Amino acid sequence: MKRISLLILISFFGTFAFGQVQVDYQTAEEAVAQLLGPGVTASNIIFTGSSVQLGLMYGAEGITFEPDSGIVLSCADVINIELPGNNLDIPFGEGISGDQDLLDIANSVPPLINQTFLVSAVNDIATLEFDFVPSGDSLSFNYSFGSDEYLTWVNSSFNDIFAFFLSGPGITGPYAAPAGFPDGAINIASVPESDPLLPITISSVNNVLNQQYYIDNPGNAEIAINGYTAQFTASAQVECGATYHIKLAIADGSDTALESIVVIEAGSFQSPSTISASVPNAPPSLPELTMLEGCVDGIFTVFRPSVDSPDTLYLEIGGSATEIEDFLEFPGFVVFPEDEVVLEIPVTTIFDGIDEDLEFITLTYNYLNACGEPDTVLAQLNIMNYNLPLLDFPEELFLCNGENQNVSGVPDEGFAPFIYDWSTGDTGTSITVTSGGPELISLEVVDYCENTVADSFLVRVPEPFVIEPDLELCLGATSGAIVLGGSTPYTFVYNTDSLTLDGTTFTPGFEGIYEVTVIDACGETGTLFIESFVCNTIIPNVFSPNADGKNDLFIISGLEGFPNSELKVFNRWGGLIYEGLNYQNSWRAEEVPDGTYYFILNRSDGETFNGDITILRK
């Protein structure tokens, strides 16, 4: 009980982390289909254990744990590794117990590492086994082991164990094998370069022993397991065309709590292909085996089928990508120096500035395989379109006084990760711009391909918000602008039945006192009162209609309060030269020369005014 209480406490404190991996349950057939790579066919597939102990892990790109995707065998529910801390690690309760070979392997470890602990039983066993036929003379696949037993239960009886039991022609081993494989099986999962071979458990690979292969995972960051190994490769010599059997197995040691997992890389179970593809130093966000146009290149690795094969292999290039346009020209053949069996062919992509869908290149050649049969091998690399990074800031960013606004600097194009250099000294993807801060803000962004884009914007704040003092207007007259500054558009609150708004000016339609409230776009508010009354008319005796913008009209002050007033103008011989039946202060005297004229104003209230008016343009 003491151990289980501690497990619950450890798991509880892990619940605050968050993993990136995802896991889907798999059938035995689905799992083997995910595992198989080139040069291998499988049959007679069997899974033993609870269905929740077998799954496909994916989404691990960019984290420390390898592989990125693979089949998971677990001593508990495989889903547990998705979210750190989501499993209290109480006994699993769904597993099966008893496998003498696994128990023997678990107990072979203590004397090899100068320890004396004893594993009493193996529980929660999960096994995936199948027959397979290789087309080459060797077998290999990649895997990693992880456990929640780390590091508390190192060198104890809780020594969870896994093994890869291989049986078939040319193999003689101490472990059980199915009928048809009478020479037994060997375990091909061991610590690299160990002699004698040391099985992999938490006690044989940890922070003290074989520490170069151990990765601690405090807080269960990214994947929910306390610690795990580096990625290993299991391999063996086989006979081309023969039938072999493999049993992939994992179990809890002594108890049924604190799960362990083994993850076998998807597609890595293969009898070596004679061509492989890779994209070294690719950014985490780039899909597997994908190059980036003009930025990230790849490699085709050509394996000579054997040292007895001809030294020249002829290659065929295919795919949707076009040589010379999308990638540099390829050789049509490769020549192996004496005793060399591997050559690398670099693939250099070309940036063409054309918006294209994903393209691909294939490299193929025909040869006689280790079985002496004609065979064809093919590898493929993809080319992803690349667009230069693009920033598109507005010329101005308007902020109300006291306002803050977040501005993102993530380019519309380019390829992450990006490096940000703001003129403010910030280096994040965005900044918070405040009113009263720098008036000019600029940003320079460098993307993964080392292409640079820059842009800037002005930060503008409103001019002071000013409301004109209270006004006195003649009835019918129009005010000047009653508001200055602030932020447009303005909202005016006023008596629409009595005042007429034109832009920011008002014209009263009736005598009285009117209240006008102005609210700008930033919420600034001001109020003024307009008093309207009937004014006496004042008639000038001279005006200068010379289009200089001054005194160009015959304006009778106060006439706005007397609509429908009549103005007549006569020359000195009594001839009518102008008549305005509803005079609106609009006469320019364009049709008459300079001189003195006689006017009559019949005001709409019944009063009549007359006199001389002089037109003087100079």
Image (cartoon, rainbow, N blue to C red):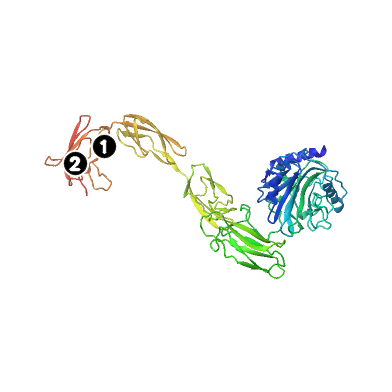
Mark 1 is on which residue type?
Ser
Q: Residue at x 24, y 42 (%)?
A: 553
Q: Earlier in the sequence, mark 1 or mark 2?
A: 1
Quarter of the picture holding the N terminus: top right
- Image location of residue 389, percent across then percent down: 53, 54
- Which residue has dot 2 on it? 613
Q: Nearer the viewer, residue 287 or 184?
A: 184
- Which residue has dot 1 on it? 557
Residue 563 lies left or right of residue 279; in this view the side is: left
Identity of the residue furthest to the right in this view: 116
Residue 217 lies left or right of residue 195; in this view the side is: left
Vertical placement of 106 versus 490: above or below? below
Please indicate, yes or no, whether residue 359 appears anywhere in the rendered image.
yes
Identity of the residue furthest to the left in this view: 573
Circle 1/circle 2 CB separation < 8 Å: no
Q: Secondary structure at mark 1?
A: loop
- Image location of residue 73, percent across then percent down: 74, 46
Mark 2 is on which residue type?
Ile
Please indicate, yes or no, whether residue 223 appears anywhere in the rendered image.
no
- Image location of residue 433, percent across then percent down: 53, 46
Give me the C-alpha separation between circle 1 and circle 2. 15 Å
- Image location of residue 399, percent across then percent down: 49, 44
